[in-house]
Amino acid sequence: MEIQAYWLYWTAFFAVVLAWSLIVHYAARKVLEQQAWAAPGEVMLPGDPRLAKLIERYRLPAAWVPRILGLLCIYAVWLGITGAAQDLAAARRALDLPDPRRLLWFLVAATAAYVAYVVVRRRLVDPASRSEPLGDYLHDLVTGGGGSLLIEPNPFWFFDLATRTGRQARRRGPSVRWDVIAVVLLLSLAVVWVIAVIWPWLVEIVTPRALFVILMLGLPVSLLAFLSVLSHYLRVPLIAGLILLLSVLTGLVPTFHDLRQVEGRNVTRLGARPSNGLMRWD
């Protein structure tokens, strides 16, 4: 639907796509850092032989699953671009529409930026890895060695950032600054999400459609990741319960499925049945 030709619009769009993939990557890694999914109901300290066995068993998939999930976000946009090119092929020349495949160069740049982040991420967040020989670093990168798998016994790890003792304890591992940045970004996204729920018309006016789609896909990721961790920790299906609750609340809103009204005209509110809309079609 978006046919804007100016480069700044699409640069912003693919920057948001890159942010979406990074959010998914980060959320997946945070889930895998928790011990609750691999050892429900247990707390294992460093040096515990059970923890060493679990890390050895899961380190390879734990290294690659977050990377693949992040790439799937970019792959979804590739499907959209190629699909739009096929759908518009017959009408593109007649309507003088730009070829959507021109955006593939932006997607290539976003993919390269994502891959570069994956490669250098540990050197950015873990001071100890910066002095590691390049060959050993790349070997660990491929095999998952030296990662942060199963290091968190408590899903409320972010509470440690509120105290000096907690921050000092976290400095023994990955840099605490990145955790702070992640929490700030998560809170910022939560604020945007709340605004989108309370004043959807404001977000509709301010945010372009293509950017809004990616924004809404990226917003719930960190929350859902935390709920999945908490589900393992409490051994309660919180995400299934949330889906059930939202389904019930959606059904209780009587105007949720009404047809959109046109401002400035005498339009009667119509129900969601297609026959009602067809009878009143103007």
Image (cartoon, rainbow, N blue to C red):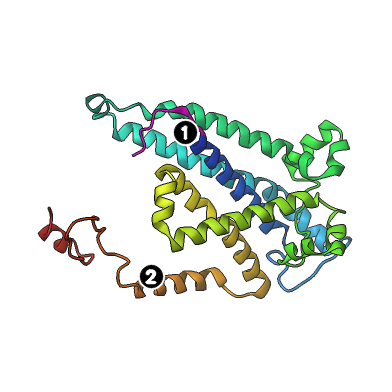
Name the amino acid, label 2.
Thr
Residue wearing tag 2? 250
Q: Is residue 69 left or right of residue 138?
A: left
Name the amino acid, label 1.
Trp
Characterize the local packing of mark 2: few (<14), some (14-19) or many (20 or more) Cα atoms within 10 angstroms. few
Residue drawn at the location 73% of the way across and 41% of the way down: 121
- Which secondary structure, mark 1? helix
Residue wearing tag 1? 10
- Residues 153 and 135: in front is 153
Using the rendered view, name the quadrant where residue 188 is placed. Answer: bottom right
Using the rendered view, name the quadrant where residue 22 is placed. Answer: top right
Residue drawn at the location 45% of the way across and 63% of the way down: 198
Q: Which segment did they paint magenta?
A: 1-11
**Residue 248: percent from the left, percent from the top?**
40, 75
Q: Is residue 112 left or right of residue 282?
A: right
Characterize the local packing of mark 1: few (<14), some (14-19) or many (20 or more) Cα atoms within 10 angstroms. some
